[in-house]
Image (tube, grey):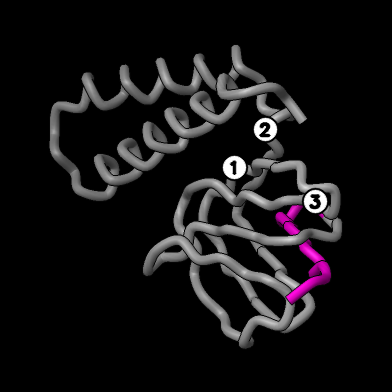
Amino acid sequence: MAGTIRLEVVTPEKIVVSEEAQIVMAPGVLGEFGVLIGHTPFLTGLKTGVVRFNDPQGHEHIIFVSGGFAEVLPGQVTILAESAERRRDIDIERARAALERSQKRLAEMRSKDEIDFTRAQAALQRAILRLKIAESRPQR
């Protein structure tokens, strides 16, 4: 089916993306999903991961998202994310510093307080993924 869909990626602070796309791929809580124009409507939670989309010219764009929800309609995908950054907006030095902080925090944890440990692990995974995204392929 030819055509484009509207992609909106929004955080509590800002609109990260508001563009037309040929296809959108996102990290659903039950697995990655892809959306083309005319898709059946659904709503799903998102896990921390990568949203990929191809613009009308076929160029791939990458966005880091940290949790949230996605609403899919036949002509639009709306992502409400806790946080989101385009690959080109990720500060590599800041991402490295966050990785080092989270590794240090996990190493220093004396008590295995489940909540703190889970939070520290989540911070580590976010830092690893942001750095991986920022250091991959040419920036768009």
Residue 86 on the magenta span: no
Residue 18 screen position, x and y as percent: 85, 57
Q: Residue furthest front?
A: 1
Mark whose residue sits in front, 3 or 1:
3
Q: What kind of residue is marked 1?
A: Phe
* Whether residue 15 can be seen here: no
Residue at image mark 3: 55
Res 23 → quadrant? bottom right
Residue 75 screen position, x and y as percent: 79, 78
Viewer-nearest residue: 95 or 139:
139
Q: Residues within 10 Å of mark 1 (few under 14, many from 20)?
A: many
Sequence order check, earlier mark of 1 and 2: 1
Residue at image mark 2: 87
Label 2's element?
Answer: helix
User: Is 59 on the left-hand or right-hand side of 123?
Assistant: right
User: Is 89 on the left-hand or right-hand side of 123?
Assistant: right
Q: How many marks?
A: 3
**Residue range highlighted in magenta:** 1-17
Q: Residue at x 38, y 36 (%)?
A: 125
Q: Residue at x 60, y 51 (%)?
A: 51
Res 135 → quadrant? top right
